[in-house]
Image (spheres, rainbow, N blue to C red):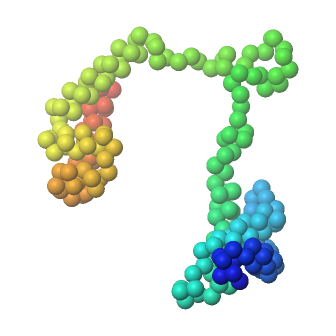
Amino acid sequence: MVNSYRRGNQGALNALMLRYHQFVRLKSSSYFLAGGDSEDLIQEGMVGLYKAVRDYREDRQASFRSFAELCITRQIITAIKTATRQKHVPLNGYLSFSHTPGDSGDDGECSLADVLPGSSVNDPVNQVISAEEVASLKHCLTRLLSNLESRVLRLYLQGLSYEKIARQLECDCKTVDNALQRIKRKVDLHLESRKVLQ
């Protein structure tokens, strides 16, 4: 039936979906989806079944049934993992800065934006301190880093991976990693010494 569907017979896909529906239902019954119900898992299982029909290859040693079971199980497990990650919870439970919690139009209440402290980015004192810190760090890096460490840092700040840096500098990845660790230690020591001076 898989080959028949691939030749354009939509009825073959429908027949496969109908034939394996009970199998998908049975497979999904042994799993639990937080925030969902059994029908959601059955739907995920049916998506896995469709992927099995789409991707099955006869030249492999597995039967369609065992391949379908694998695809269905993987799809269900992926759905469960995605649901438990709760990636979108912050977006779904947001709190508006511009409206009061009981926003009924009362003029007496202030919003969250009204009580949060303003940005200190434009504060001249902070700008001078930041400029001094950057200048101090630049001086530290030019004075304390070896030639290799300087070259590694420059390439690292350009976003190159350890492998690409190693290739460009004709060394191994361990040398790059060691150089970056030394740089980090030197910067940490510099920052600690600046804290003592303040």
Q: Position of residue 5 (x, y in %)?
A: 69, 77
Q: Quadrant of residue 142?
A: top left
Whether residue 27 is visible:
no
Determine whether 100 is above or below 92 in the image: above
- Quadrant (top left/top right/bottom left/bottom right) for the N terminus: bottom right
Q: Position of residue 98 (x, y in %)?
A: 71, 21
Q: Out of 63 and 188, give the one closest to the viewer.
A: 63
Q: Quadrant of residue 116?
A: top right
Which residue shows up at 30% across the image and 37% down it?
A: 188
- Quadrant (top left/top right/bottom left/bottom right) for the C terminus: top left
Q: Quadrant of residue 143?
A: top left
Which residue shows up at 64% across the image and 64% down it?
A: 78
Q: Is residue 83 left or right of residue 141?
A: right
Q: Position of residue 153 (x, y in %)?
A: 25, 41
Q: Which residue of the protein is positioned furthest toward the left in this rendering? A: 147
Which residue shows up at 79% across the image and 79% down it?
A: 15
Q: Position of residue 194 (x, y in %)?
A: 29, 26
Q: Out of 80 and 192, give the one closest to the viewer.
A: 80
Which residue shows up at 22% across the image and 55% down it?
A: 167
Whether residue 154 is visible:
yes
Q: Out of 108 and 41, give the one closest to the viewer.
A: 41
Q: Is residue 35 left or right of residue 59?
A: right
Numbered-mark total: 0
